[in-house]
Image (cartoon, rainbow, N blue to C red):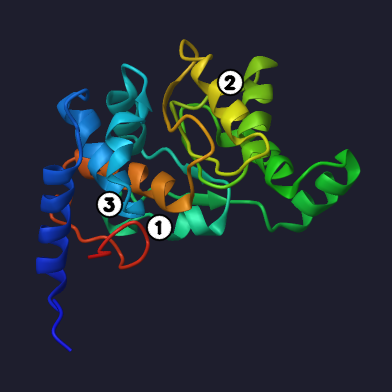
Amino acid sequence: MNYERKPAQIYRLSFSRVRQEADLSRYTRSQADVAVRIIHACGMVGLGTELEFSGGFETAGRDALLRGAPIHCDGKMTAAGIIRRSLPAQNRIVVTVDSHETTELANKLETTRSAAAVDAWTSELEGSVVAIGNAPTALFRLLEIVDGGGPSPALVIGFPVGFVGAAESKAALAARRRRFEYITLPGTKGGSAMAAAAVNAIALACGRNPDAEPPEGAGGVGG
């Protein structure tokens, strides 16, 4: 069969085609760089007109990663898409959804494990990067903690997907624009690959490994 086999060429052509086909005119350069990676992760060029960014998202995210802040993820799928070799300070990627303590807390509070998992982040949440790609309840719980006077992350990448709570949780995130910086996609669309792609874009903006190739199928070399 005749198909492109060279990873570097696949990577180059993919990003070139995204920039050719997507309407990125409403974005700043830094926003466009993130948008390109997100579009590449999901194959939907129409997202070029749908993504929403707070004004200082890149500076907040870049500074957090450069000083070694952890990246809190709502699930293993989100964490798996992050290009670890591109992280500027060997930043830890934290996933607590599968811990025994999380399961016990979820049962006690009669909530999802994704929401209960957020409570385990509080000791390191201040100034961190949060990437939510699956669970609206995780984003809602994060906002409850911040609203209650708890620690606040530097950047929230909010891409929960689905038909129950996804659109509402992202609208609630955008409504708190003065509390922290954020990137989100209004409505029901989202997913782990998009959230991970946004993290990768911020990490690459830190200046390390600018030509790093994403892992195939995880927000990256999809062709």
Label ID, residue 64: none
Query: What residue did someone put label 3 on?
Result: 40
Q: Residue 19: x, y in percent?
A: 14, 43
Q: Residue 209: x, y in percent?
A: 16, 53
Gap between marks 3 and 2, in whole Å? 26 Å
What secondary structure is marked by label 2? helix
Nearer mark to the viewer, of 1 and 2: 2
Gap between marks 1 and 2, in whole Å? 25 Å
Query: What residue did someone put label 1 on?
Result: 81
Residue depicted at x 38% and y 54%: 82
What is the crowding at mark 1: few (fewer than 14 residues within 10 Å), some, or many (at least 20)? Answer: many
The quarter holding residue 1 reads bottom left
* Label 3 vs 1, first from the N-terminus: 3
What is the crowding at mark 3: few (fewer than 14 residues within 10 Å), some, or many (at least 20)? Answer: many
Residue depicted at x 55% and y 22%: 171
- Residue type indicated by callout 3: His
What is the crowding at mark 2: few (fewer than 14 residues within 10 Å), some, or many (at least 20)? Answer: some
The quarter holding residue 99 reads bottom right
- Residue type indicated by callout 2: Ala
Q: On the picture, is 1 further left or further right than 93? A: left
Label ID, residue 172: 2
Seen as rendered, the residue at the extreme top is 178
Q: On the picture, is 194 further left or further right than 141? A: left
- Residue type indicated by callout 1: Gly
Is residue 125 among what the camera can see?
Answer: yes
